[in-house]
Image (cartoon, grey):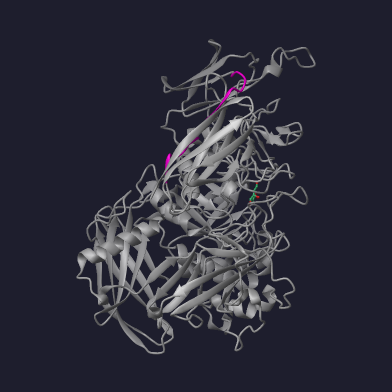
Amino acid sequence: MSPWHIVSAFAAALLFSTAVSTADSVSPRERLRINNEWRFMKSDQPGNAANLSYANLKAWILPTGNPFLNNPARRSPAPAEQFTDAISYAQPDFDDSGWRALDLPHDWGIEGPFTSEGRGGTGRLPFYGIAWYRKKLAIPAADAGKSIFLDVDGAMSYAAVWINGQLAGGWPYGYASWRVDLTPYVKPGGVNQIAIRLDNPSNSSRWYPGGGIYRNIWLVKTSPVHVAQWGTYLTTPKVSRSSASVHLRVTVDNDSTRGSNVAISTQIFPLIAGSNRTGPLAATIAPVSLRVPPRSNASFEADAVIANPNLWGPVPQQKPNLYLAITTLKSGSRTVDRYETVFGVRSLKFDPNEGFFINGEHIKLNGVCDHHDLGALGSAVNYRALQRQMEMLVEMGTNAIRTSHNPPTPELLELADRMGLMVMDETFDCWLRGKTPNDYSRIFADWHEQDTRMLVRRDRNHPSVIMWSIGNEVGEQGQGAAGAAVAKELSDIVHEEDPTRPTTSAMNSARADSPFPAMIDTAGLNYQGAGNRGAPPQYPVFHQNFPAKFVFGSETASTISSRGEYVFPVAEGTGAVAGPETGEDTTSHQMSSYDLYFPPWATSPDKEFAAQERYPFVGGEFVWTGWDYLGEPTPFDSSRSSYFGIIDLAGFKKDRFYIYQAQWRPDLPIAHILPHWNWPERIGLKDADGKAVQTPVHVYTSGDEAELFLNGRSLGRKKKEQFQYRIRWDEVVYEPGELKVVAYKRGKQWATDTVRTTGEPSKLQLEPDRATIAGDGSDLSFITLSVTDQAGLTVPRAKNLIHFSISGPGEIVATDNGDATDFTVFPSKDRNAFNGLALVIVKAKRGQTGSITVSAISEGLKDASTQITVRR
Ligand code: GAL
């Protein structure tokens, strides 16, 4: 159940407990998730003669975006004519019983198969093409006279919506959330046929975009006079521990042909952390009358004060306290709408010299960039999978996420609000100058304003959002005044929708003396901040050129590694550009996990940490990336998924996790040794000069000193020097046995870690992240399989083939292992372990309860099984 549902359910209860419930006091607003029981066909109708290209449908699609165009002259009038081409896939009487039955969210590409042809950028999966989704909707006769909307959180891409055979609207950008007004077409008291066509071009993305209705989809019913889509906007202009002012704007739509007077009131309640309950009333905005003209809208603004507010702030320093505003519209004694807004009270300061402050406290942005896919589950949104990603990031010490390079799913922001993660919310990867032939540049001219306003209106009540990014590494950076003019236009649009947060753009090539950076509020630097490609660090250059601008690393590091792979010899210092002699295993297409290798534009964690420390005015960084993602498999284009992640695609921690955790959670006692200690081929190995080869041992620790022991012998106690973030024993000569590190902090023992040479693979182990899940058809258990030796130690190079099976009320949705070169399709129940580990993802069947058993077998190894309880 999403938090939104929890809140809704509770708020309904609140209504019943505070008022005498009469028909008049119940809001007609309904928001129904309509994800279940769709029919799917991955093609157009054979022999279909109609031209359904976007260019041909555009006149009917563009009006859907009209509410997001401020200048009436830019709006598109609805065509006088219906789109008349008869397309049987859109007709109510078309027999779709032979189509595949499925539930949304759905990503048609993730099932594969992988292809070895073409470029690896988009993950080698078939995400492109045309598809239709159909569903029958029963709309009761009692809904006559209501406004009825279809709200789509995201569909990839170029969506066109037919209802009862008529083209009602659509939206091209696959990452946008949008609404189509179904009111003129629905038949209350009957069965209504929805048909959605998607046309997802190839060569449209630099990473795996997925394909399909991959986010949630809703039917919204309201009275004709109602709070507009994303029609509330709450800000907190003055915040202190003792009091906060809340400013509220409500926009009310009147879809009827008669003017209407409504009384608007708002009540504000604290949400009790970690529960579904609200606390006692915190503030009230008394009813005020608003006249809403026919077929138009009107806005109302008011202020309230919350005494002793519970502030929202990032963990671990602060608490993510939230409030719920319930806005009620009444016509006489009749409630015509009741609209809930979750928001937070906090103050932000972006100081050019001191860095970032929230609620008066200085906090460094310890951020990561992430793409939207959920690994083996593809782009289809899953609340638990997203929560798992974010939980692991919090465990690492992450306090901010950049939604690279597009609007996120709404659930990401709900989770960020509740978990205390800050968000840099981004619109686009390109503007008019494209990066791939069929990307957003094709529609930028027509849609940039709608897509920008959409994002800000949708997301501006989320306290987690601290900054708006209008674009990533856009080609316009290098276009002088012309490029800067586009930046200004986008930045101005954002300011119109939300003057409370700064704009930024992630700049990899704009120089400090070029016109581009002057147009945005904060200077987000990709890679160039710490210095790259032989150029000096640009953090101080931007700081000097823009003394009034906050400067930060909007994208940093881009270190590449494969979990558990180590390539020798090991680079010195803060690392090297990856190549056949530096970090790459050109046979297996794996990258060394010494965390010292990166593409030419990028760097290591160590070098970025040093730059952040040298220039304390820098507000923090967003590392590329928190999690591995599908596509962009730099430097081995033949692979399926990235090497950039700190966490691999399956959710297993790479070594890098601990260098960030040590830096970002300095109070957590940790020590982490790399590499593993199973190197039989290095016993007695000599180099060309007859010298024993070295197997360097590196330690990541939040301590400041450490002593390493090999089979009980000390290899020396070493200090982390200034601007050093790892302790290295590079001269170690391998011998099997035990490596142990004892870390110290301020002279006292602080943390230890031990790595042992293991025996041969002997048994399997299964460990679920959660042993009880809900039978709601979407909750998941992520089960880790380990290949262990006789003593139960995970064998670090084991690649055994595992077969998974399941019994009881559940299904295996996907398996993975984090190996970027593994072309076994994700739904497969057979999966090789990769360096000792594999993952199996299990879902309960919708509406069922009981006990699921998941088993794993592998030739020659003792098998394993585990139980998952399914609750209501
Ligand atoms: C950046 C870009 C990212 C990703 C990254 C890989 O330049 O913004 O999207 O491609 O490089 O290092």
Up-down relation of residue 134 to residue 708 (above or below): below
Q: Camera-side residue: 669 or 131?
A: 131
Q: Where are the magenta residues, as a range?
A: 758-773
764 magenta-colored: yes
Q: Looking at the image, which is closer to me, 164 or 847?
A: 847
Percent of width and height locating residue 147: 43, 79
In x, y percent, where is residue 508? 64, 52
Instruction: Give the image location of residue 626, x and y in percent.
Output: 55, 44
Camera sees residue 508 = yes
Q: As rendered, which of 787 and 688 lies closer to the eye?
A: 787
Give the farthest residue toward the right.
688
Residue 674 placed where, x, y %? 58, 25
Q: From the image, which quarter does the N terminus lie in?
A: bottom left
Q: Residue at x 58, y 38 (%)?
A: 804
Q: Nearer the viewer, residue 651 or 77?
A: 651
Residue found at x 24% / y 66%: 16
